[in-house]
Image (cartoon, rainbow, N blue to C red):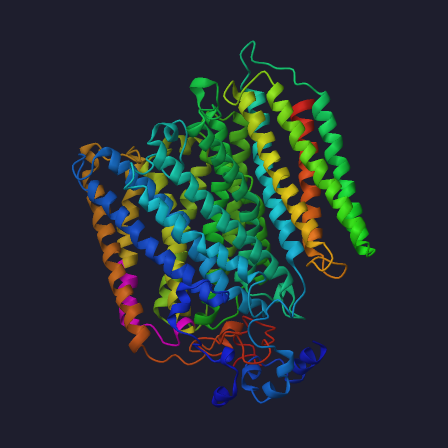
Amino acid sequence: MTSLSSASSTTSTTTTQAIESTPELQSSSDQHPPAGDHEEHHGDFRMFGLVLFLVGDGMTFAGLFAAYLTFRAVNPLPPGGIYELELLLPSINTALLVASSFTFHRAARQLRLGEGFGCRLWLLITAAMGAAFLASQMLEYFKLPFGLTSNLFASTFYVLTGFHGLHVSLGVMMILIVWWQARAGGSINRESHFGLEAAELYWHFVDGIWVVLFGIIYLL
Amino acid sequence: MESTTELPSSLIPNHGSWLRYLSFSLDHKVVGIQYMVTGFLFYLVGGVLAGMIRTELATPISDYLSREVYNEVLTMHGTIMIFLWIVPVVNGAFGNYLIPFYVGARDMAFPRLNAVAFWMIPPAGLLLIASFFIGGASQSGWTAYPPLSLRTPALGQLIWIFSVLLLGGSSILGGINFIVTILKLRRPGLKMMQLPMYCWAMLGTSILVVLSTPVLAGTLVMLAFDIVAHTGFFNPTIGGNAVVYQHLFWFYSHPAVYIMVLPAFGLVSEILPVHARKPLFGYTTMVYSILAIVFLGLIVWAHHMFTSGTPPWMRLFFTIATSFIAVPTGIKFFNWLATLWGGKIALNSTILFACAFIVNFVLGGITGVALAQVPFDIHVHDTYFVVAHFHYIVYGGTVFIIFSAIYHWYPKFTGRMLNEPLGMLHFVLTFVGFNLCFGPQHWLGMNGMPRRVSEYDPQFTLMNQVSSVGALLMALSTLPFLINVFHSAWRGRVAGDNPWRALTPEWLTSSPPPVENWAGAAPHVEHPYGYGLVETTP
């Protein structure tokens, strides 16, 4: 890359010379690999792309939260339509999900240390915690005294927690895929671990959304 | 280039057959053309629907279409034109074709994602059109306001929701790709403030896409729940709140206007300097204006809802914020005029469409500021005045620029020039037809003709007939354009690499460009608008 920029500075700033200088092509062909390997000669921006995607995903939640808060503020529920939510199970759920962020982080660190077995073990633990969260969420759904169409609060509650639960389900699947890829001889190893990092970032995001959701729906 | 024979096949212009345009291609230029042709096909469909609307409105009574079909037609017209023609073409087509050139890259940051984003569009569009034939399309307008959207045929409304979700998803993936490409894929040494203006416009647009489209997605999922599961989010009869839908919908759909018009601002900023042979006036202010429009565009949505029982403080806030948008927009407008001022303007189809854009856009912009004022807005809300304002922005603004850009970049896409006399004919028909069609609608709206009706008071007949004649001219204008595009592809004058003697990087390669964009290194363009500067003029 350094030779490239010096070449262009020696040909002065005249822009047209860049296309007229075809004789240069043969000598510098190694700097310009042929078609097909676009991804090779620039850095890896997949993480940045994922962050942007999560910003968008976060906006979906923001819209739903805004709708929920507005409904609460302007649409008072009829008498008898107000429910005290059970706090014990959701609190355990929150602790479970927050803790799973740390176990995932630990898995990533193990991989960086070259501990393939430890990495896979912590990944499995994280996936199990995610699955436990989902199971416990289902349990809560069955115990609740209202259904999807009972009233406005009930509908918003199920759509919000359900949409989040969908994210958790996808996350658990991602973790299991990463767990499989991190096996000995798999595509995720100490040198190449984008999949694991991406799944980790996604998991932290889902975790963070839950904390906000817990605060808004259960505590507020 | 004599050395073509020695080049690897990937560097030869026109590599591969035209069948690659029907494939899952990763080449950003192929994807760009795919967006453009697909978008134009949907434009023709939307245009036929518009023709049906204007035919119905040529007489004050409902005689040509049944009322239900009229509602379906106007809903599909709006949805197709916005989501399948303007957004994909002005973002996807030109963005994909030009942005990698402008940042000095050989492709987009995520070529595969790019192809996926494109291939979500044809199924979504076909699905939408198919809904006409399976139980009837949605009849609730492109805004799909509940409770109206809860009362139209459920299947058509659900197909509409699903299509818009697909198109929104495509748009988000494209937006992510543009942001990463513009911020991260610039060739070494290329500073942000040296980027051609279209890059800044697409950066701003993509930020709006990523921030606002997901909100629409969430809202439409809630609407789908209301239809399928009979929840009551937006259904007032069972305790819901329809105004919340409007807030969430406009949180996307007002920025969507900027998603449609900001890229056009970028394209006109590329076109004017080339054809006026002058540097773009006020580059820095242009950049900050775009950023200001992006920010303000996110906080003005409720000006669409002044008649929806909005509290006074909300009216005040959104009126002031909306009026503020006129400032950065005005800066851009005067910068374009200053770019033209004293230039050596070539009178061709490209510049005619671009100048007509400026005229139309000022008219649309002024009526926009007027609509931001609550008393006036309440008077003309949901009348033809709003229809006129909107079409002056998106047709008079964006579509004129799309045509201008096609005349400008067609030589780059194909290696041949478009025919100028046919282009002039296209321009005259479009410009006269457009103003005949939408100009009288201001008057109709001011005098109280509501929009989205197939019958009206006979006192409005004359102006409606003028409007319909204008629509006919617009329909006719498509013919010389289509003839031109097909004829010139075979018989057009060979363009050479840089027929406009332009300085932006896409012209500093062969026409059409090789797969790898440049045979050698990406050219170092320090002054993309350096016309008249001694050391940069070719």
For this rendering, which residue is in front, A111 or A12?
Answer: A111
**Relative to B473, is A100 on the left or the right?**
right
Position in image of residue B534 (x %, y %): 56, 80
Does A116 appear in magenta? no
**Relative to B508, is A47 on the left or the right?**
right
**Residue most toward the top?**
A79
Q: In this rendering, does residue A101 appear at all?
A: yes
For this rendering, which residue is in front, B156 or A92?
Answer: A92
Quadrant placement of the N terminus of chain A: bottom right
* Residue A21 against residue A106 in the figure, above or below: below
**Relative to B489, is A55 on the left or the right?**
right
For this rendering, which residue is in front, B165 or A37?
Answer: A37
Does B427 appear in magenta? yes
Q: In the image, which residues are magenta?
A: B413-429
Position in image of residue A65 (x %, y %): 60, 31
Question: Which residue appears at 57% of the width and 60% of the height?
Answer: B110
**Relative to B201, is A83 on the left or the right?**
right
For this rendering, which residue is in front, B253 or B465?
Answer: B253
**Residue most toward the front?**
A184
**How many numbered marks are there?**
0
On the image, which quarter does residue A204 sit in? top right
Quadrant placement of the C terminus of chain A: top right
Position in image of residue B23 (x %, y %): 43, 64
On the image, which quarter does residue B21 sit in? bottom left
**Residue most toward the right?**
A113
Magenta region, main secondary structure: helix
Question: Which residue appears at 59% of the width and 74% of the height?
Answer: B525
Q: In this rendering, does residue B307 appear at all?
A: no
